Amino acid sequence: MFTWYQDAESCYVYLSDVCFDSDDVMMDGSDPEWLKSFQSSKWFTRGWTLQELLAPGTVVFFDKNWMEFGTKESLEDQVISITGIRHLFNIEAASIAQRFSWASKRETTRIEDTAYCLMGIFGVNMPLLYVGSLPHSRPTLRYVHCAWKGISKLREMETSC
C-alpha cells in the first residue's frame, strides 16, 4: 500500500469529524473551530493513515462536507504539531526509533494491520496475507506488535513477547 500511495499524484483525505467554515478563520492568531477539530481528528490516530500521510507528495484534506481546506504542505506546521513528525516530505531522514515512535501513537484493529502499516515506512514490501490464526505466524506478529507499542530495545521485545 505504501508504494501505491507513493506513486499516486495526490492522496485525498476525507475527515468526517472536521467541519471547515471559511468564516471561522481568525486573523488574530487564535485557533478557529475547524482547526481544533482538525487537531483532534480520529484520522491522526489510525494505523493505516500513517501511510496516507507520509507516502504521497501531495495530500489534500477535505472536511465532512467535502470542502477542501488545505494540503499537507499548506498545513505542514499544524500536521507536525499534531503528529510530532518533522519529516513529512522525507521519511528516510528519520531514524528507526523516530519511525517507531510515529507508529506507536496509532491504533489498528488487527495485529496484522500493525505489521503492514509499519512495512512501508521501513521500506519493506511483501504481499498482504492475513494469517494471524496460523500458529507459526504468531511470534512474528507479536514481535511487530510489541515494537508498534513503543518497546524500543530488541532484547526487551524478545523477553517480553
Image (cartoon, grey):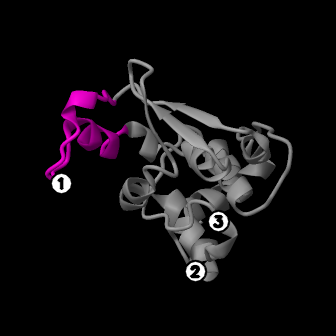
Q: Which mark is residue 153?
A: 2
Chain part drawn in magenta: 18-41
SS at badge 3: helix
Q: Which label's residue is closer to the chain start, 2 or 3? A: 3
Q: Residue at x 42, y 23 (%)?
A: 67
Label 3 sits on what residue type? Ile
Residue 106 left/right relative to 42: right
Q: Earlier in the sequence, mark 2 or mark 1?
A: 1
Asked if the residue under mark 1 is in contact with the one under mark 2, i.e. CB atoms within 8 Å, the reply is: no
Split into 4 quadrants, where in the image is the C terminus? Answer: bottom right
Q: Which residue is mark 3?
A: 91
Q: Is residue 21 left or right of residue 53?
A: left
User: Mark 2 and mark 1: span between their CA atoms?
Assistant: 42 Å
The N terminus lies in quadrant: top right
- To which quarter of the image does residue 157 belong? bottom right
**Residue at mark 1:** 29
Q: Amino acid at mark 1?
A: Gly
Q: At 18% across and 54% down in the image, what residue appears?
A: 29
Q: Can residue 93 be found in the magenta stretch?
A: no
- Image mark count: 3
Q: Residue at x 66, y 50 (%)?
A: 57
